[in-house]
Image (cartoon, rainbow, N blue to C red):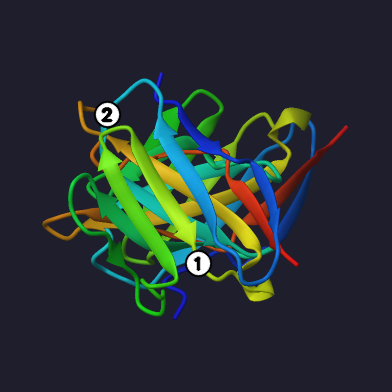
Amino acid sequence: GAVVSQHPSWVICKSGTSVKIECRSLDFQATTMFWYRQFPKQSLMLMATSNEGSKATYEQGVEKDKFLINHASLTLSTLTVTSAHPEDSSFYICSARDRGGGDYYEQYFGPGTRLTVT
Amino acid sequence: DQQVKQNSPSLSVQEGRISILNCDYTNSMFDYFLWYKKYPAEGPTFLISISSIKDKNEDGRFTVFLNKSAKHLSLHIVPSQPGDSAVYFCAASFFTGTASKLTFGTGTRLQVTL
C-alpha cells in the first residue's frame, strides 16, 4: 500500500514553454501533498505544501507564479513549471500524507520527475 | 541555513560489517526524525523513524539512535548488505499546528563492498 506515482518520469522541454507534472496517490487519500526539488548531489528542498481544495503554501524563495500547484482532488496534485528556463532543470519529487491514518509525520514519496529545459 | 546536516558525503563498508550513518541538527523544535533510502532517479523510500521522546528505535537490521542533548542521530545497519548501497537521507520534522514539513539533510552515499 501507500503508493505514489508521478507522470511523466522524464521530460525535456524548450525554454519558455510550460510543463505539467502530475502526482497521484494510488491507494490512499491524501489531504496534503508536498513538492520537492533536488539538484544533483544535493538535498531535497521543499518547494510547497498543497492541501486539497485550498491554495498551496510556498517556501521562502519559491516563486508561486512560476511553480503553479493545484491539488484538485484527494488523490491528485499537479505542479506546472511555467515559462521554463534551463535553471529550472532539476529532479522534482512529490510526496503525500495518508489522510486515513498512519504516522502523522510520515510521507510517501513518488518516483520523481526529471525535467530538462533546453 | 542547513538545519539538518550529514557531514559525511560518502561511506564505504564491507559486507557483513556495521554501517553507521550520522546526522546532526540545529533546530531544537524538531521532534520527529526519519531516515530515507534513495536510489538515483527514484523517490526516497522510508526506512525508520524515531520520536524525540525516545533514544532508540530498532527495526530488523536498522537501528536509529537519538541523542537530544547533542542534537545528533545515527542510523546503524547490521549486517550491511550489497543491496544497502544507496544514498541515505535523514529528515527532521515538527508539527506547526497545521502541517508537519520534512527538512532533509544532504545525504550520505553508502557503498557496501563484497
Q: CA distance from mark 1 to mark 2?
A: 27 Å
Kindly give the residue lying farthest to the front in the view shown.
Answer: A17
Same subunit, labels 1 and 2: the answer reads yes
The image quadrant where one finds the C terminus of chain A is bottom right
Q: Is residue A47 visible?
A: yes
Q: Is residue B31 visible?
A: no
Residue picked out by circle 2 = A29
- Whether residue B80 sits left or right of residue A88 in the image: it is right
For residue B15, the mark is none
The numbered mark 2 sits on a residue in which chain? A
Based on the displayed image, in which of its 4 quarters is residue B71 positioned?
bottom left
Please state the horizontal and vertical placement of residue A2, each as a whole percent of the image. Answer: 39, 25
Q: Mark 1 touching mark 2, by CB under 8 A?
A: no
- Whether residue B109 sits left or right of residue B52 in the image: it is right
Residue at point 68%, 50% (across, down): A11
The foreground one among B40 and A12 is: A12
The foreground one among B83 and A58 is: A58
Q: Nearer the viewer, mark 1 or mark 2?
A: 1
Residue picked out by circle 1 = A82
Rendered position, B8 above or below B95:
below
Residue at point 22%, 47% (across, down): B53
Please state the horizontal and vertical placement of residue A4, each as a whole percent of the image. Answer: 45, 32
- Whether residue A102 sits left or right of residue A109 in the image: it is left
Kindly give the residue lying farthest to the right in the view shown.
Answer: B114
Residue at point 27%, 59% (across, down): A56
Q: Residues within 10 Å of mark 2 (few under 14, many from 20)?
A: some
Q: Mark 1 belongs to which amino acid?
A: Thr
Q: Residues within 10 Å of mark 1 (few under 14, many from 20)?
A: some
